[in-house]
Image (tube, helix red, strand yellow):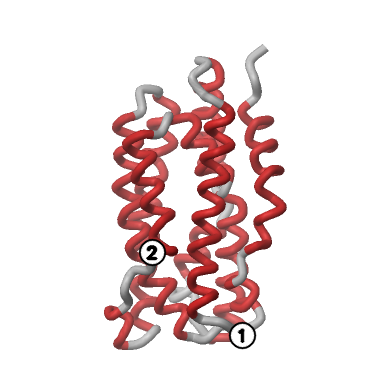
Amino acid sequence: MTRSARKLLEEIQAELAPRDGDNRLVPLITAGRAPRAVFAALAAEEKLITLSDWRSFHELAARADEPHARTFFGGLAPGEQQANGMLDALLAATGPDHGKERPRAGCQVYPAYVAWLALNGESSATAAGIFANFAAFGRYCRDVAAGMREHYGFTGEQCAFFDFFAADVPEIEEQALAAIQAGLDARRLDEREAHRCARLFQSYELLFWNTLADEFPG
């Protein structure tokens, strides 16, 4: 009997769960202890990340030779473009110096890895690695948006990027499971690679947040 994509994802997420709390910036924001300047940095870094990921997801979709993988990656790309535009209000609200932000290596490793996978990754293992981290990222974004409203007075428009990624989108889950299942059924998905991919995504995700936590301590 073919391995279940959902079961594989559950195993990967259980492996990642103990480290999900290693994000040191989100608790500072939810407590109102992070300096307001951190939001200019967040917006500037995410502006670069969403543009890079938009291109990478298009490349992943174009390179995938399996229809479900093409659907999954192709469906992610428009969301990155939409999210990129949502950052404009936050950038405008964080002051005239936001354009002077210089990219931080610790923040840009994540999109660099996505770009590497766009050229080198097996589609179904990449889908598993990306989707396995979505739940944690969604929680981070939900908590950031709540902290922005409660402690910093940001408007809904200025929080829109984080609200967008905090929202549950069942269609994306269905597409991810279909892409992973297709890889399992065809015996192309190496489960070790899927676990490794997910661990790296989690590490790079945490590096993003913790790079900013180090620069903007509460």
Residue 171 in sight in this render: no
Give the amino acid type for the residue marked by disc 2 in the picture: Ala
Pick the front one: 171 or 36? 36
Q: Position of residue 156 (x, y in %)?
A: 49, 75
Residue 78 placement, left or right of 204: left
- Residue occupied by mark 1: 33
Residue found at x 49% / y 36%: 127
Residue 149 placement, left or right of 47: right
Q: Is residue 166 above or below residue 174?
A: below
What is the tally of numbered marks visible in this picture?
2
Q: Is residue 18 above or below residue 61?
A: below
Residue 14 in sight in this render: yes
Label 2 Cα neighbours within 10 Å, binned few <14 / some 14-19 / many ≥20: few
**Quarter occupied by the C terminus:** bottom right
**What numbered label is drawn on residue 105?**
2
Q: Position of residue 169 (x, y in %)?
A: 54, 48
Residue found at x 67% / y 12%: 1
Q: Is residue 5 above or below residue 73?
A: above
Residue found at x 44% / y 72%: 42
Asked if the residue at tag 2 contacts the one at tag 1, i.e. Cβ–Cβ closer than 8 Å, the answer is no
Give the amino acid type for the residue marked by disc 1 in the picture: Arg
Q: Position of residue 46 (x, y in %)?
A: 39, 64
